[in-house]
Image (cartoon, rainbow, N blue to C red):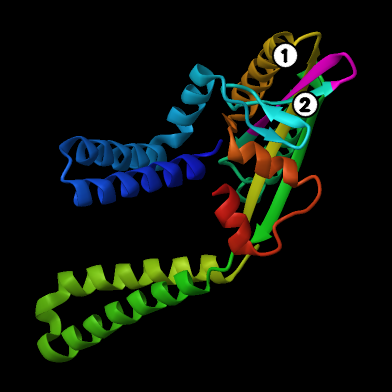
Amino acid sequence: MDNKAVTVACMCAGALSLLYAAFSSSGIAAAISSFFFFASLVAWKYGYIVVPVLCQLLGVKAKVGNIELSPSQDAAIEQDGGEFVASAYLRLEISQSLADKGQEEAASYSQAFERALCSIKNTCQFSLLVTNLDLHDELEEVKARRSMAETKLSSMLSSKGAKEGADAALLRREIAMWNRLIAKLSGGSRPMRVLFYAVASARGASRQEALSRLSAQVLEISAVLSSSLKVDVHRLRGEQIVQCMSLAHRIPTTKNEMEGMFF
């Protein structure tokens, strides 16, 4: 059960209740319709919180082939012989870039990354999904802003002369700022959109045992990466897990598809 399915179901139920209320003049049906429309808004906005809780309370299990999601929808469970294997998917957000560091600082960060990986006790898979970013529109907008500032400066200097010296100085600084930004966007390494995620798995004689061991592994990985590399770790849920599982067979074919799936 994903957020979209719950949202669509609530909207359909609300629409049917509204039609019934219109034909029967029933106040109860109108109230039910209002409830379902409100529920659809909640599911659309906060479904990532509400849907897992509802699934856990109602005992609803989401399945993808032979793999089912945990009641809290933050793990994938697969039966292997007489045991169960639970897997968690963690999105890793690294705010720092080696391209922005000096040679010594970059080497130090790479060593810290190696040490962090070596300190993880259990098996863990790290994956990268990379695509180039097209900054053509952003670059054109910056050039337009620079052009506006240059026009204002030219008009000011030709009409009022030295009386507007302070304003002219501000405009020159603004133009210099736009020039620096244009140079940064136009030169150097091309910006990249990167999805960096990790997969951890744990085995147990029951679903609960596998999930319990998996939680301990996730805590360990999160603690190691957060403390040593300043990485933000986010545990994926529901539909996001299904999308990551699909990456084992195929990857997004366009930049827009990747943006729509994960960002």
Q: Residue 3 carries which label?
A: none
Instruction: Give how far across and how far down residue 40 sits, in percent.
Output: 36, 41
Q: For the point 53% across and 67% down, which residue is it?
A: 185
Using the image, determine if residue 162 lies above or below residue 134: below
Q: Is mark 1 on a helix, strand or loop?
A: helix
Please tell me in which quadrant of the rendered image residue 259 appears. bottom right
- Quarter holding residue 156: bottom left
What's the amino acid at mark 1? Arg
Residues rendered magenta in the picture: 80-90
**Would you name the residue on which mark 2 appears?**
117
Residue 231, how many percent across, how many down? Answer: 60, 32
Q: Quadrant of the N terminus?
A: top right
Look at the numbered disc 2 and give the secondary structure of its residue: helix
Image point (60%, 69%), residue name: 187
- Residue at the extreme bottom of the image, as rendered: 158
Tell me what residue is drawn at x 25 percent, y 72 percent.
171
Q: Is residue 55 magenta?
A: no
Is residue 241 or residue 263 the one in the foreground? 241
- Left-right relation of 253 to 57: right
> In front of the other: label 2 or label 1?
1
Give the main secondary structure of the magenta stretch: strand
Few, some or many C-alpha atoms within 10 Å of disc 2 (few <14, some 14-19, many ≥20)? Answer: some
Give amino acid for label 2.
Leu
In terms of depth relative to the viewer, which is nearer, 199 or 180? 199
Residue 104, compared with residue 50, is above or below; it is: below
User: Which one is nearer the viewer's eye here, 87 or 5?
Assistant: 5
Q: Do the residues labelled 2 and 1 touch (CB within 8 Å)?
A: no
- On residue 207, the disc is 1
Q: Relative to residue 192, is residue 104 depicted above or below?
A: above
Q: Position of residue 238 (x, y in %)?
A: 59, 34
Can see residue 79?
yes
Q: Which of 23 and 115 is in front in this view?
A: 23
